[in-house]
Amino acid sequence: MTDYEKQQLGKTLWAIADQLRGAMNADDFRDYMLAFLFLRYLSDNYEIAARKELGPDYPVPDNEDRRAPLAIWYLKNPDDTAVFEKQMRRKVHYVIRPDHLWSSITELARIQNGELLNTLQKGFSYIENDSFERTFRGLFSEINLGSEKLGRDYSERNVRLCKIVCEIANGLAEFSTDSDTLGDAYEYLIGQFAAGSGKKAGEFYTPQQVSSILSAIVTLDGQEPATGQRSRLDSVLDFACGSGSLLLNVRHRVGLHGIGRIYGQEKNITTYNLARMNMLLHGVKDSEFDIFHGDSLINEWDMLRETNPAKTPHFDAVVANPPFSYRWEPTEALGEDARFKNYGLAPKSAADFAFLLHGFHYLKQDGVMAIILPHGVLFRGGVEARIRTKLLKDGHIDTVIGLPANLFYSTGIPVCVLVLKKCKKPDDVLFINAAEHFEKGKRQNYLLDEHIEKIVSTYQFRKEEPRYSRRVEMDEITENEFNLNISRYVSTAVLEEEVDLGAVNGKLVALEKAINAATDKHNEFLKELGLPPLPRF
């Protein structure tokens, strides 16, 4: 499928969502829409694997028999289903019973079957609880099919679900879909729902243009970015991964086989489920990623709480778009945490540096970290100034990038990207002021490819350009008391042309002489005419 067709599919599905959700909030309807799209993907993937497993015994589809071929095989081979499902758990790591396949669900919706809701509920539960891998556990836990937002009673909810499923099925039928296409459609819908979610969008979505900047930076060689992209990353971490789009962007940039394993962490349960679905929809096998549900700040992930430093995991790349100026509860125990002990605890009113230090702690010595933060981290005082000062003195802050305002759905404030390294060669800090390089949109500003390429190229080759980028020595930063406010180092203000007062005075004197000479000549004519003369300057 071409990029244009993928975009059309996304638009078709969004039009369906916009039409069907009615008075329901975008956030609420998003969960139903994306869950059904994911069920379609799981079903397609499962039926392809089943066809391969059963070989010639797999029934040939019959246009007159609207049952799923697998349903026909189950009826003909009741004694073999247990062995078959055991094989499917081993090979695809989950099982979908024939009644729960997307083709079966859409048929129930088509005939307005009163058991659609119950069947969907059983199907979701079976996939979650009878799968081989924990990746599928609780995957549909936030899909409340009994919600009054769908209808006042079971009958109303069932009718509404029939309509939703039918419309989605009809929309998908217009296109030839595969897993990549469904993944792109899923990503498109996440972006559209983010646009309708306002401030809540920040919980689950990083704009693709910003994701592209971060993914490009962390996939370049950590020590010598100018040499180009690394051929492989053993691991990448996003500790506030939202729907996983930033991690997928990194994977896309290095290629399908360029990352050993993807790690993500997400506190919000609904968004955590979105991230797992998003990974699978984009063809990332459940053995290739690990998304954990838990709080990064208190470090709930046992894998990262390894008491033996030699066994603590570290990552080639760390990317993150954590919640801006998030209020948290720094405790005495956290003050002794290895992540914060040498730097101090971020203030209760803003956990920005706590997030940064968490990710930085798990970065490899030759790794690269890129994190999106509010501009306040660049200049705020108190403990934040002490943390910033130590990071600078230790040579860990490599680049500061100022982005335009109003790029995010969740906030209109301009943000910055901090690039950090545990071992960096340049003694200076590169400042990139890209705040005025954007395309203005109706609701949001956005970055064109040329804007993204300029930022990445400037970082890669550490280029300097008036009113855009500059390499600043530590002596100057020290003189500025470790304040990293970008405008101190790269001002976008247009300087007025310097006025040469001597030259201007000379011109004025010459003009005065010329005027007086012309006046004298004119007065001669006036005298001949008997008229009074004009005054001289």
Image (cartoon, rainbow, N blue to C red):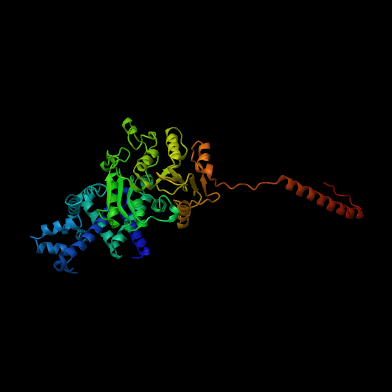
Q: Nearer the viewer, residue 391 or 511?
A: 391
Residue 457 shown left or right of residue 19 in the figure:
right
Residue 274 point in image, percent of width and height: 29, 50
Q: Position of residue 218 (x, y in %)?
A: 39, 51
Is any part of residue 216 visible from this angle? yes
Answer above or below: position of 327 versus 91.
Answer: above
Q: Is residue 95 visible?
A: no
Residue at the image position 45 percent from the left and 38 percent from the top? 393
Is residue 106 placed above or below 377 in the rendered structure? below
x, y percent for residue 326 = 37, 38
Would you say 43 lies left or right of 494 here?
Answer: left
Q: Nearer the viewer, residue 86 or 303?
A: 303
Quadrant in which the N terminus is drawn: bottom left
Q: Measured along the vertical axis of the image, is residue 366 above or below residue 49?
A: above
**20 or 438, which lies in front?**
438
Instruction: Give the x, y percent position of residue 531.
Output: 89, 52
Q: Quadrant of residue 392?
A: top left
Give the farthest residue toward the left.
79
Asked whether 236 or 153 is in front, the reply is: 236
